[in-house]
Amino acid sequence: MNTSHVQIIAQQSKIATKLLASSSESQRNLALSKMADSLESFKDKILEVNAQEVLTARQNGHSDALIKRLTIDDKVFKYMISRLRKVAQSPDPLNRVISGHTNPNGLQVYKKSVPLGVIGIIYESRPNVTTDAAAVCIKSGNSIILRGGSEALQTNILLADAMILGAIKAGLPEHAIQIIPTPGHEAVNELLAMDNYIDVLIPRGGKDLIKRIAEGTRIPVIKHYDGICHLYLAEDADPTQAVELAINSKCQSVQVCNALETLLVDKNCAEQLLPLLKTAFAAQHIELRGCEQTQKLIPDIDPATEDDWHSEYLAPILSIKIVNGIDEAIAHINHYGSGHTDGIVTQSLTMARQFEQQVDSASVLINASTRLSGGGDYGLGSVIGISTDKLHARGPVGPDELTTYKWVVYGDGHLRD
């Protein structure tokens, strides 16, 4: 692929987004439905191609975590389809009157939601990002340029082709969804230079990828670097619930950004809870690392170092720290956390409210697993990622977060005095 091809893709997306902005809600929902139908008609081929890419990844020595992210089986495919259909059922994010008023002179002023424009998404490993991203962008009236990782290239091309067919059947512009169909860094570098055509970039992947994208472009970037997620077990935490939530937060899927990485245990319940936690985590083959106080109560674990408190393991490793009350827990989270997802287990509404108000994270959970932070479990359907930024979006990035607004003014010959 040469630079002119990337530029053509960007130019075509810019044209398509103007047409999408004026599309009706019913047309965009029909497109999502037909995209899902088209994917289902391609299912056998998609699974076949994906199985071959999974086999190649294994032969190339990729990690089990990457293999899991790469794999589409019947369950994953069904989930991908369901997310397209769910986002079609969600409220229209466009043309909402966000605020408005009429001046004493009769001038009507309001602002309404509109699409961002052209969204470029650069991602690794996960073919489900291809369908999620397309769904969110079409729902919000944005055109999308997809650039997935080389390990899933053929799967992603097939997914994109199927969705393009569905979108065209619904009458959307043919370039509303596009994919860059070759591996290598050259095409990505050219994409980063397309600030005349692309309005927002969203990188999905490891910290190095996200940093390279953010530092290598003038295009605004919605990003998250780390998911250093915490769960604080307060002194009044119900023991059964505390253990269950800690296990689910860490073990349900260790390689994802909202998996638990540091467990904070109040000193007043540590003696009771830590032996229970050790047994439960051992059954899940989780390596524990602890502060000095933790090692005194469960002595046969490795010490936690300063680096551990800064670590997003994405692996079966968990650091544990005993803290002296909620203030110390909050201070630790705000110092070491990445602003992604943090939770508390408590029976006290007062402590829950203090934690909610003082922890500076995109998602704060009370008596719930950190694994619930995301679009699906928040009832948003598909999301394009999770942002730890504060501008433009924060937390799960769904259709609403891919809109901006414009001011609209109605007058009757009004003049400025």
Image (cartoon, rainbow, N blue to C red):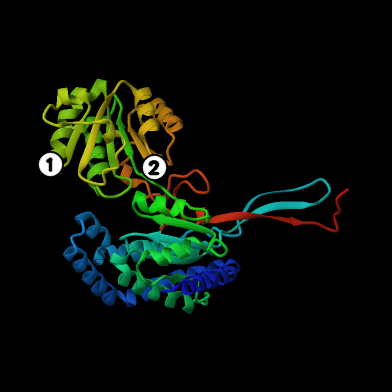
For the residue pair 148 and 235, the one nearer the viewer reads as 148
Q: Within the image, what quadrant is residue 84 found in?
A: bottom left
Residue 22 percent across, percent down from the top left: 61, 68
Q: Amino acid at mark 1?
A: Ala
Residue 336 percent across, percent down from the top left: 36, 33
Q: Amino acid at mark 2?
A: His
Residue 78 percent across, percent down from the top left: 30, 65
Residue plotted at (84% across, 48% down): 105
Q: Is residue 13 left or right of residue 72?
A: right
CB atoms of marks 2 and 1 within 8 Å: no
Report the Cα–Cα distance between label 2 and label 1: 27 Å
Q: Which residue is mark 1?
A: 283
Instruction: Describe the element under mark 1 as helix, strand or loop.
Output: helix
Local packing at callout 2 (Cα closer than 10 Å; few below 14, some 14-19, many 20+) is: many
Vertical placement of residue 393 versus 161, above or below: above
Image quarter where the N terminus lies is: bottom left
